[in-house]
Image (cartoon, helix red, strand yellow):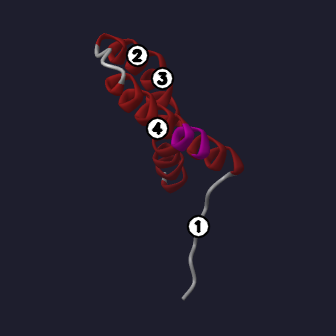
């Protein structure tokens, strides 16, 4: 069985950063709710969630865009 994985080094980097941000956001949301401060969740979601969405796009959206450009 041969796996044909064509990831660039920067896609791996963006993926690892996305994973770290996702774990950090999840941890901070549960910690904030455990401290009974639900208002802070909105601020944390904006501060951590926006970079997370950007890095997820750079991980997966960029890959699909490069794949489409190679096929054309």
**In the rendering, at what x and y percent does residue 29 appear?**
38, 28
User: Closer to the N terminus: mark 3 or mark 4?
Assistant: 4
Q: Are marks 1 and 4 in contact (CB under 8 Å)?
A: no
| Above or below 33: residue 60 | below
Can residue 56 be spotted in the picture? no
**Residue topped by disc 4:** 22
Residue 48 circle label: 3
Q: Secondary structure at mark 2?
A: helix
Nearest to the eye among marks 2 and 1: give it: 2
Task: Answer with the quarter of the image where residue 36 lies.
Answer: top left
Mostly what secondary structure, the magenta segment? helix
Nearest the viewer among 6 and 66 is 6
Taking the magenta stretch, the answer to whether it contains residue 70 is: no
Q: Which residue appears farthest toward the front when viewing the image?
A: 35
Q: Secondary structure at mark 3?
A: helix
User: Closer to the N terminus: mark 2 or mark 1?
Assistant: 1
Q: Which residues are magenta?
A: 16-20
**Residue topped by disc 2:** 46
């Amino acid at each position: 069985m041969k796996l044909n994985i064509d990831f660039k080094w920067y896609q791996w980097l963006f993926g690892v950063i996305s994973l770290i941000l996702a774990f950090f956001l999840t941890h901070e949301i549960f910690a904030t709710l455990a401290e009974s401060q639900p208002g802070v969740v909105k601020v944390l979601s904006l501060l951590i969630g926006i970079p997370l969405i950007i890095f997820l796009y750079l991980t997966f959206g960029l890959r699909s865009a490069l794949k489409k450009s190679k096929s054309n």
